[in-house]
Structure formats: C-alpha cells, structure tokens
C-alpha cells in the first residue's frame, strides 16, 4: 500500500503506519514535532495523544457498565469486588497464583478437572504484583485485567487508525467496549491480557516490526489456549512475505518472528504433557476433563439443536444469537479483504470457538479477542447520520450494561 500523508494541525503522520512520521516498515525516525519551535514528541506519546478520545470513550463505557453492575450487586447483597475477582474461572487463576498448580476436582461421574487447563501468564503476573504491592490476589488480578484492557483498546485503535483512519478507529474501540459480553474486560479474566498482546502483535506485523510481532505472539500464547491464533497470523504473514519476496528470504528477523510466535503456546502444552506423562497428548487429555475438545462443531451443533427444540436458559439463547452474528460479521470481514494477519487471526479464533465442544455458554467470551469482526460495523457507524449513530450506540450500551449485570449477578450458568 502506498503511504498517504495528511496534515492535522501542525502534526504530520502517516496513516498507513499510525505513528507520526512513521514508515510502513516502522524504521523512520523516532520523534515528531507538535508545533513550530516545539520540542520533539516521541512517537508513542503522539500516538497515545491521538488515541486519547477513543480510550476515554472506552473507559467511560466500561466504568458505566461497572457502576450499573455494582449498584445491582449491592442491591442483592453481593460484594461487587468479589463478583469481579472471584467468579468462575477467576477463582482458578487466583488459586494458581496463590498456591501454584496441582488442584483437581473429581466429579461423581468420574470426570477430573485439573488446573493445568489454565495457562500460566496471568497467574504469574498476579503473583508478581502481590509480591511487590500490598494487595490481595483478587485486587492484583483486577489491576492487571483493567490495565490490559486499556492497552488492548489502544492496540485496537492503532490497527483501526492504520487501516481506516481515526474516526473508524474510535468507533471500533467503542463497539468493542460495548459488546454484550464486554463485562469480562472488567473481571479477573484473561481475555483482556490476550487481546492486548494480540492487538499489538498484529500491529507489529502490519508495520513490519517482526521481532516485536513474534515476542508479543509468544506472550499471547502463554495467556490463553486460543492465543495460538496470534501465532497462526504471524507465521502466515511471515510465510507469505518469504514466498512473495525472494530478496527478503535472508531476513533473519522474519525467520526469528515465525519461530518465536508459537513458542509460548507450545512450551506450556509440552510442559503439561511432560507433567502428566504424555508429552504430546497430555494437555489435550486435561482439556477433555473439562469436556473441551475440537470436534469440528459436532458438539456445538448438538447444543444448537437443544436450544432450538427445547425450552432453555436465556444465556444459551443469547450465546446462539451472538455466535450467529459473529459468523455473519466474519463473512463481512472476508468481503472487506483485510490484511492477511487480521483475516487469519480472526478466522482461527472463530474456528476454535465454533469447532470446539464444551461449555457452549462461554463461546461469546472466547470471541471477545476477535475485534476485527467489528471493522465493518465500525465503518458503517462512521458513515451513518449522527442521530442514527447515537441511537445505535445508546441501544448497544443499554444491552451491554444490562446483560453484563445479568451475567455476573443473576445468570445460572458460568461465563
């Protein structure tokens, strides 16, 4: 793509790179000027300043959602902090941070659920924070999640700005912060951490920063099982670049990026394998204890049939609607012909979510990191009339706040 330069006040920035004065490969100088005679402004500070309005909208959306949930939780005599920090999987992660791996649950039917199913980066960060700050593991987990959510929103903005400009980037961040399941971004869960590493790894790929892309992808692979989607994207772009351009086949950065990208995910899978006595299959056996396996959608279709043919719980109906909408949005994303990195990343996330069996009600949460699905709606929102855009945003906000509160305080099923 040919770089197009545009002027905004006294600041010049390259829309294809998303950083002031940047170049497509990210090798240009490291400062920009904010005005005549002004001192140089580092690229990251200029980029953060441009992202500030979008990040402010994201923070306002999430804080409002938290306030609504907290008010209802107090009304029903449930401590909001405990709801956010110790619900469902959060408790598993924090127990790993406090005591290490080794906890299992055995059910009457013989099923064994092991905490080895949970990837190690988040509990390791919780333990690191509690060793430095005088806070509980729950508070540390929330601090990490909220910080990661902010970093993720900035990364999502950076990608949107690079591809379509500021207005679309702002709409993209706002829509991501108002998804029906976006309350998860405020909980002691790993989705914010994965999305932060994923977004910035993808941005590094788009801007030609290969070593950053590989390193951040490796960290994403240590955060969650579906972090392998980031590695798939990095390796796909690296392979395409090497095949397309013979002159770059000697570029060690590209080869190193492709080698680093899956390292975190593979390392933990092998660790669990060796710990369970089955190096290649041990981790997947642990996942089967949680009824989680990839069966090409057979389990998901069985759940859909049950939802359609029999009376069922409201969260399962919402899950079906959200997953169906996500498939439609993926089709729109394909028609948009986005960069290969975004297409592969999103496609792998959707494939893992739809093709995996297990907890059907958790599928919307698994799709939270798939922010490129919102590119088409974000572009449409920027083209809509201001009144229409405001009504749609308000409606989405109402749904997000109400449904998020329901999921954390009233829902009979886990997230």
Image: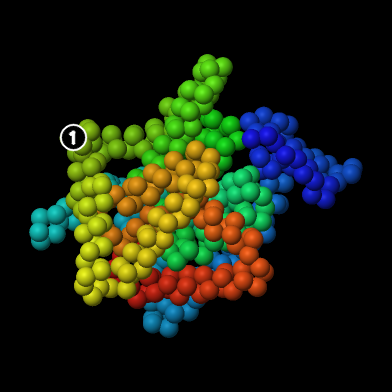
Front residue of 279/377: it is: 377
Q: Residues within 10 Å of mark 1 (few under 14, many from 20)?
A: some
Disc 1: which residue: 278
Image quadrant holding the N terminus, namely top right
The residue at the point 38 percent across, 50 percent down is 350
Image position of 126 with respect to 384: above or below:
above
Image position of 283 with respect to 298: above or below:
above
x and y percent of residue 207 in the render? 60, 35
Image position of 268 with respect to 135: above or below:
above
Report which quarter residue 309 is drawn in.
Answer: bottom left
Say whether residue 107 is left or right of residue 376: left
The residue at the point 26 percent across, 56 percent down is 300
Report which quarter residue 228 is drawn in.
Answer: top left
Report which quarter residue 206 is drawn in.
Answer: top right
The answer to whether residue 392 is visible is yes
Q: What element carries label 1?
A: loop
Image position of 113 with respect to 391: above or below:
above
Say whether residue 255 is left or right of residue 269: right
């Amino acid at each position: 793509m040919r770089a197009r330069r545009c002027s905004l006040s006294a600041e010049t920035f390259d829309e294809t790179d998303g950083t002031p004065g940047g170049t497509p490969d990210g090798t240009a100088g490291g400062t920009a000027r904010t005005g005549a005679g002004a001192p140089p402004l580092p690229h990251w500070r200029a980029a953060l300043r441009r992202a500030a309005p979008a990040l402010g909208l994201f923070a306002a959306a999430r804080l409002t959602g938290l306030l609504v949930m907290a008010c209802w939780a107090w009304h029903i005599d449930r401590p909001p902090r405990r709801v956010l920090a110790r619900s469902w999987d959060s408790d598993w992660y924090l127990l790993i941070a406090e005591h290490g791996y080794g906890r299992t649950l055995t059910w009457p039917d013989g099923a064994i659920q092991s905490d080895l199913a949970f990837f190690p980066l988040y509990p390791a960060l919780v333990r690191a924070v509690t060793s430095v700050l005088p806070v509980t593991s729950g508070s540390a987990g929330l601090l990490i999640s909220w910080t990661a959510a902010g970093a993720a929103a900035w990364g999502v903005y950076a990608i949107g700005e690079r591809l379509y400009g500021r207005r679309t980037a702002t709409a993209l961040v706002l829509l991501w912060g108002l998804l029906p399941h976006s309350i998860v971004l405020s909980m002691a869960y790993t989705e914010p951490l994965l999305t932060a590493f994923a977004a910035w790894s993808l941005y590094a790929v788009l801007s030609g920063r290969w070593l950053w892309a590989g390193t951040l992808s490796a960290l994403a692979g240590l955060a969650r099982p579906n972090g392998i989607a980031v590695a798939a994207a990095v390796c796909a772009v690296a392979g395409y670049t090497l095949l397309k351009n013979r002159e770059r086949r000697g570029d060690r950065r590209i080869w190193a990026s492709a080698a680093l990208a899956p390292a975190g995910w593979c390392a933990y899978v092998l660790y669990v394998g060796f710990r369970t006595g089955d190096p290649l299959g041990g981790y997947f056996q642990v996942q089967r204890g949680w009824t989680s396996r990839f069966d090409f959608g057979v389990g998901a279709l069985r759940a859909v049939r049950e939802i359609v043919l029999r009376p069922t719980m409201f969260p399962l109906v919402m899950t079906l609607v959200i997953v169906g909408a996500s498939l439609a949005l993926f089709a729109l994303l394909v028609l948009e012909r986005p960069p290969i990195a975004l297409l592969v990343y999103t496609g792998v996330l959707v494939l893992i979510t739809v093709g995996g069996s297990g907890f059907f009600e958790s599928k919307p949460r698994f799709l939270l990191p798939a922010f490129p699905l919102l590119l088409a709606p974000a572009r449409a929102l920027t083209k809509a009339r201001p009144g229409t855009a405001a009504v749609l945003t308000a409606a989405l906000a109402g749904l997000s706040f109400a449904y998020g509160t329901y999921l954390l305080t009233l829902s009979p099923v886990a997230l």
